[in-house]
Amino acid sequence: MKNPPKWIKAIPQSNAHGSGALQKRLWRLCSDFVRIRDWSKSKRCIASNRPIYNWKDGQAGHFISYSKCNGIFKFDTDNIFLQSAYSNAWGDYDDWKEFERQINLRGIDTDELRVRNRDTPLKFRDADVIEEMKNLLTKIGELKIHPEYYDRAIKLLNS
């Protein structure tokens, strides 16, 4: 996207996921939202139950791996949870089974996640990314902790 609005530029790009600056900013929002959401509730890795002492120390890990996610489903927060860096990178089958069990305990149907991913189109537009960014800013606003860029992004979005 050429010349994105200032509120989008206020969100730092992620170094992890996304193709292009807009998706990298969406991933930053998505990752920060998930890590703050889950850390505020449990302060533990969903897969290994290891303690995570600060939300910034955890990672946002996909249940259905990023490489297997279709289109905008890559950024679906029902599929992404707080994980320790070790578990996210090197987790084994036992970690994955615990990950699935914990998701089910939270009321998320993992079979339904698989269907939603399967039914998500591979391609998506910048407008879809921007809509999801606005949705995530709203969700972050409902949390007690906000990333450092949040207030500036909201101020620019609402001006």
Image: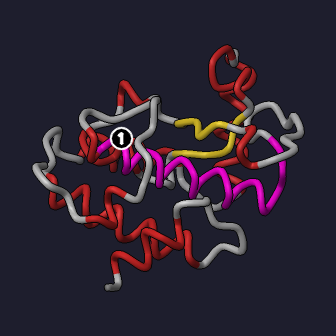
Q: Pick the residue in front: 70 or 25.
A: 25
Position of residue 56 in the picture relative to residue 72 (left or right): right
**Which residue is rendered at x = 49% and y = 54% of the image?**
77
Q: How many marks?
A: 1
Find residue 125 and report its horizontal and vertical position in percent. 12, 51
Q: Pick the residue in front: 132 or 110.
A: 132
Position of residue 18 in the picture relative to residue 60 (left or right): left
Q: Is residue 159 above or below residue 101?
A: below
Identify the secondary structure beneath mark 1. helix
Position of residue 153 in the picture relative to residue 34 (left or right): left
Residue 39, by quadrant, is bottom right
Find residue 157 and report its horizontal and vertical position in percent. 33, 77
Q: Residue furthest bottom?
A: 159
**Which residue is rendered at x = 64% and y = 39% of the image?**
100
Whether the magenta-drawn stretch holds residue 40 is answered as yes
Quadrant housing the C terminus: bottom left
Whether the magenta-drawn stretch holds residue 43 is answered as yes
- Residue kind at label 1, given as amino acid type: Lys
Q: Pick the residue in front: 32 or 102.
A: 32
Q: Is residue 5 above or below residue 55?
A: below
Position of residue 143 in the picture relative to residue 141 (left or right): right
Q: Badge 1: few (under 14), some or many (20 or more) residues near its Cα, within 10 Å?
A: some
**Which residue is rendered at x = 72% and y = 74% of the image?**
144
Magenta-colored segment: predominant secondary structure: helix
Q: Pick the residue in front: 91 or 22.
A: 22
Q: Is residue 65 above or below residue 43?
A: above
Query: Which residues are drawn in magenta?
Result: 23-44
Find residue 101 and report its horizontal and vertical position in percent. 71, 42
- Residue under label 1, please give it: 24
Find residue 19 and report its horizontal and vertical position in percent. 26, 33
